[in-house]
Amino acid sequence: MLILSGKVALQKNCSNIIAFEKVLKVYCAERRADYDTCLLYYDVPNKFKIRPVRKSAKAIRKFILDVEKKWGIINILLIIGGDAVVPFFRLTNPCDDSDAWVLSDNPYASRDDDFLIPERICARIPDNKDTDFIIKLLQKKSGHRTRKAFGLTARMWEKASENVYRQIGKVKDLKVSPPVTSDFIKAVWLNDKDYLYFNVHGSNESANWYGQDGDEYPIALKPDNVVNAGGVVASEACYGAYIIKKSDKNAISLKFLNQNDVLCFCGSTTIAYGPATPPSSEADLLVKYFFEYVKQGVAIGESLKNAKSDIARKSIRRHGFLDDDDQKTLLQFVLYGDPTIRLNTK
């Protein structure tokens, strides 16, 4: 397990990192019982005598590959910091939509130039410009099983969302927007859960997520609604995992991560695609598979990696190839949080 960050960039973004480094040493010591663990900064000298590199996604990826040559196979990569510390890759958008590129961590998880299906587990702990935020995420433990779930969907995707939600909860409990809006969200709905699922609209400019019924787009969820939330969070919202130049004040993903009992956040960095009705495909299918693995007690990092492999295999079986929407789905979904934690199944 390689834990990677940029020391100069992290100090610039978060100021004092001394407390963070102490906690990270404890984290590494705890993980060494199960994983061969190594912490490296890409921009300072290291024990492998690999030349430090500048803050560039391509240069950092080459650094990781060079580490693997010296250290051995890296099966798990944990990135510490947001885009200002370890940049997302800006990949060519395979879809004809308004995204200039796809923000992705897939290349960090790949050993060759085919980035669609990751070869190693990869997750990221954003910094939120605060090392206390990183520390909180590093100190989270594998969660207990409440066998409870909460789901919220835009009305136009209700049938498709039911097909995903039934993996984790009772379809009759799935909330629909409208009529449900942020003004009527009860904090208790998000408390003490194993799973939190969202299939709503999002934006890279707005802090809110939106429902839809025809031409009506009410605010379904806003950061202020997220209070004492808990569980594994997966969102199909467009830009649900978009965090560039954002904080927990204006990014729901970061607000979830700042909750004591939220284990992780899985979401899309750009415009995501999914069907209006079953069968599940694209983002619906990926989140469905992700929840299925998490429910089995598989670590969250491995759950997302497996889900991406499964959606690729199914799409190829179904069509003989990966279409543009499938490709974008595989590239855009990222995982925020410690990839080694899991929901305990006992």
Image (tube, rainbow, N blue to C red):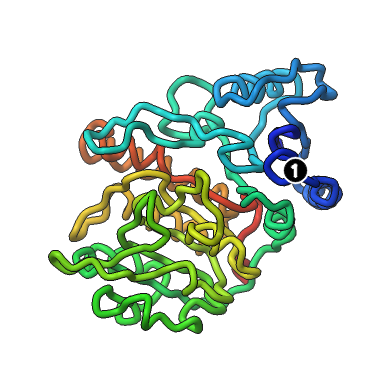
Residue at the spot 41% in from the left edge and 32% down from the top edge = 116
- Residue identified by numbered label 1: 35
Relative horizontal placement of residue 134, taking residue 38 as reference (left or right): left
Relative horizontal placement of residue 14, taking residue 246 as reference (left or right): right
The residue lying toward the viewer, choosing from 167 and 98, is 98
Farthest residue, direction left: 214
The residue lying toward the viewer, choosing from 71 and 222, is 222
Looking at the picture, does residue 45 appear above or below residue 102? above
Q: How many marks?
A: 1
Q: Label 1 amino acid?
A: Tyr
Relative horizontal placement of residue 36, taking residue 193 as reference (left or right): right
Residue at the spot 33% in from the left edge and 37% down from the top edge = 328
Residue at the spot 55% in from the left edge and 55% down from the top edge = 247
Q: Circle 1 sits in a helix, a strand or a loop, which is it?
A: loop
Residue 276: percent from left, percent from top? 19, 58
Residue 89: percent from left, percent from top? 49, 30
Q: Quadrant of the N terminus?
A: top right
The residue lying toward the viewer, choosing from 160 and 310, is 160
